C-alpha cells in the first residue's frame, strides 16, 4: 500500500525503534513504529498466509561486487551525502543492485539475510499488474470488459460499469481514502475486513471481497488517477473469477516460478483464503531484483523465456493516450510532475526512463532503462509515508547509474 504522499521531513535517527519482545506484537500494534522492524520480516507469524512457490531451477545471480557507497547524492532539499549515508538514514533492512547481468551490491544492515522474506507492501501491486498482463495476453481477461461481466456479484455495486483497464490504472470512481494515519479511512477499515487489524468498526464486512462489494462510486469511472489499494485487491478477484485459480497460485505459475525466483514468496490471506494482493506479498530482495530485471528486459527472464508479454511491458512503460493527463489531474499528492501510473507501476518523470514499484514504509523496486540499473530496497520507516526518504533513495539510485 503506497503513494508518495506529502512531505513529512527526514529523520536522521539511523536505527528504528524495536519492540522489547516480539511476543508483545499483535494485530493492534504490528504496524507501529516500535514493531515494524520485526513484523515486516515475520508476517506469517501474525496472520494467515498462502505460499507462492518459486522455481525448482532458479536463475543464477552472478555476484560482481562494486563499491558504490562513496558515490555522492544530492537531495531535492539541498541535503548532500553519499549512497551509504542514504541507506543509513532511511531505515534500510536490505538492498541490492543489478547491472549488466550481475549483482553488483547486496547488503543487509538490519539482521536480514539473502533468504529472509520481507513484507513488500504495495510493491505487491506491481507483481499483480504483470499477472493481469499475462491473462490479457492469453485472452482470459479483456481490459475493456466491465468488471461485472467477470464477477457477476459486482452488478449493482459501486464498481458496476468500471472496466478492467479502469481498475488497472486506478481510474474508477470508487470512494476510498488512502489516508494511512486516519484510523477510519477505508484503507484502515479494509484491514479490519482482511484480518490485519482488530475488528472495532461496526458494519465492516468480514471478508476482503465482501468489503470491495460494499464500496460506492462517488464519480464516473474512467476519470483521473487516484491511488487506492482496493483496486489491486479487485484485480486479484478478477483473476480468480476469470480462471478459477487462487491468486497465490496464479502469481506462482504465471510470474514467480517462470522468472526463476530462488525463494518461495508468500501472501497474506483473509479468513476465507482470499489473497491480499494490494500489499500482502512477502519476498526476498534477490527475487525483487529478478522481478525488476523482467521489467527492464521486456519481460524476458535470465533463462531467455518470455515470462511477461513484451507488448505488456512496453504498454506499461509507454502508457495510454491519456495516462499523463489522468495523472496530472489526480487528487492524490504524487510529487511527480509529468509522471504517470500504468499497470500498477509508477513513472516519476516525463522522460519515462525510470519505473518504480513502491510500498509504504520504504519498499521499492527501481528500474532505469537509460542506465540499465535495477535496484531493490526493503525498509522499516517509522511512518508509512516520507517523501524525503522516498525521493532521496531514488536520487541515490540515479547517482549510482550515472556514475557507471
Image (cartoon, helix red, strand yellow):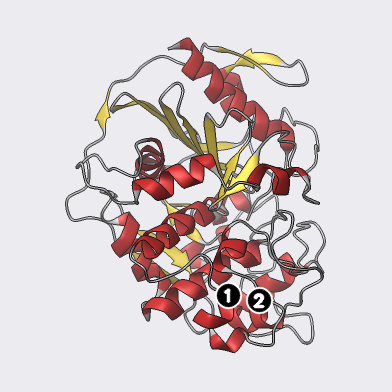
Q: Residue at x 79, y 86 (%)?
A: 202
Q: Residue at x 59, y 29 (%)?
A: 394
Q: Residues within 10 Å of mark 1 (few under 14, many from 20)?
A: many
Q: Secondary structure at mark 2?
A: loop
Q: Residues within 10 Å of mark 2 (few under 14, many from 20)?
A: many
Q: Is residue 107 above or below residue 271?
A: above
338 or 262, which is in the foreground?
338
Residue 339 vs residue 274: left or right?
right
Q: Quadrant of residue 59?
A: top left
Where does residue 190 sit, x and y in percent of width and height? 68, 72
* Marks 2/1: CA–CA distance: 5 Å
45 or 270, which is in the foreground?
270
Residue designated by label 1:
146
State if disc 1 and disc 2 touch (CB < 8 Å).
Answer: yes
Q: Which tag, 2 or 1, sits closer to the chain's start?
A: 1
Where does residue 310 sit, x and y in percent of width and height? 35, 46
Q: Is residue 391 above or below residue 190?
A: above
Location of the N terminus (image quadrant)? bottom right
Q: Residue at x 60, y 29 (%)?
A: 393
Amino acid at each position: 500500500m503506497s503513494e508518495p504522499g506529502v512531505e513529512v521531513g527526514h529523520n536522521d535517527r539511523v536505527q528504528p525503534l524495536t519492540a522489547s519482545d516480539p511476543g508483545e506484537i499483535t494485530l493492534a500494534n504490528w504496524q507501529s513504529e516500535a514493531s515494524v522492524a520485526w513484523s515486516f520480516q515475520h508476517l506469517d507469524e501474525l496472520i494467515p498466509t498462502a505460499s507462492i512457490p518459486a522455481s525448482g531451477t532458479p536463475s543464477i545471480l552472478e555476484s560482481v561486487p562494486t563499491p558504490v557507497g562513496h558515490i555522492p547524492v544530492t537531495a531535492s532539499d539541498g541535503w548532500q551525502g553519499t549512497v551509504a549515508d542514504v541507506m543509513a538514514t532511511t531505515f534500510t533492512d536490505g538492498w541490492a543492485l543489478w547491472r549488466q547481468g550481475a549483482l553488483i551490491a547486496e547488503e543487509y544492515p538490519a539482521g536480514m539475510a539473502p533468504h529472509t522474506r520481507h513484507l513488500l507492501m504495495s510493491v505487491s501491486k506491481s507483481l499483480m499488474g504483470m499477472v493481469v498482463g499475462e491473462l490479457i495476453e492469453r485472452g482470459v481477461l479483456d481490459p475493456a470488459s466491465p468488471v461485472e461481466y467477470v464477477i457477476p456479484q459486482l452488478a449493482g455495486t459501486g464498481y458496476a460499469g468500471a472496466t478492467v483497464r479502469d481498475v488497472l490504472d486506478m481510474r474508477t470512481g470508487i470512494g476510498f481514502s488512502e489516508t494511512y494515519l486516519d484510523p477510519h479511512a477505508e484503507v484502515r477499515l479494509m484491514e479490519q475486513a482482511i484480518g490485519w487489524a482488530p475488528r472495532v468498526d461496526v458494519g465492516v464486512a468480514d471478508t476482503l471481497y465482501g468489503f470491495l462489494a460494499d464500496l460506492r462510486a462517488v464519480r464516473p469511472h474512467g476519470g483521473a488517477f487516484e491511488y487506492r489499494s482496493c483496486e489491486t485487491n479487485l484485480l486479484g478477484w478478477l483473476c480468480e473469477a476469470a480462471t478459477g485459480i487462487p491468486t497465490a497460485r496464479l502469481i506462482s505459475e504465471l510470474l514467480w516460478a517462470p522468472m526463476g525466483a530462488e525463494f518461495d514468496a508468500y501472501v497474506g490471506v483473509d479468513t476465507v483464503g482470499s489473497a491480499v494482493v494490494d500489499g500482502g506479498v512477502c519476498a526476498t530482495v534477490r527475487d525483487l531484483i529478478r522481478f525488476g530485471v523482467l521489467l527492464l528486459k521486456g519481460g524476458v527472464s535470465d533463462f531467455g523465456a518470455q515470462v511477461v508479454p513484451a507488448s505488456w511491458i512496453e504498454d506499461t512503460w509507454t502508457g495510454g493516450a491519456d495516462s499523463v493527463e489522468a495523472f496530472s489531474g489526480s487528487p492524490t499528492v504524487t510529487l511527480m510532475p509529468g509522471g504517470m501510473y500504468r499497470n500498477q507501476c509508477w513513472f516519476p518523470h516525463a522522460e519515462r526512463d525510470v519505473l518504480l514499484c513502491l510500498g509504504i514504509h520504504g519498499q521499492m523496486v527501481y528500474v532505469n532503462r537509460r542506465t540499465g540499473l535495477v535496484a531493490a530496497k526493503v525498509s522499516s520507516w517509522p511512518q508509512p509515508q516520507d517523501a524525503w526518504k522516498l525521493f532521496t533513495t531514488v536520487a541515490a539510485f540515479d547517482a549510482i547509474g550515472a556514475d557507471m
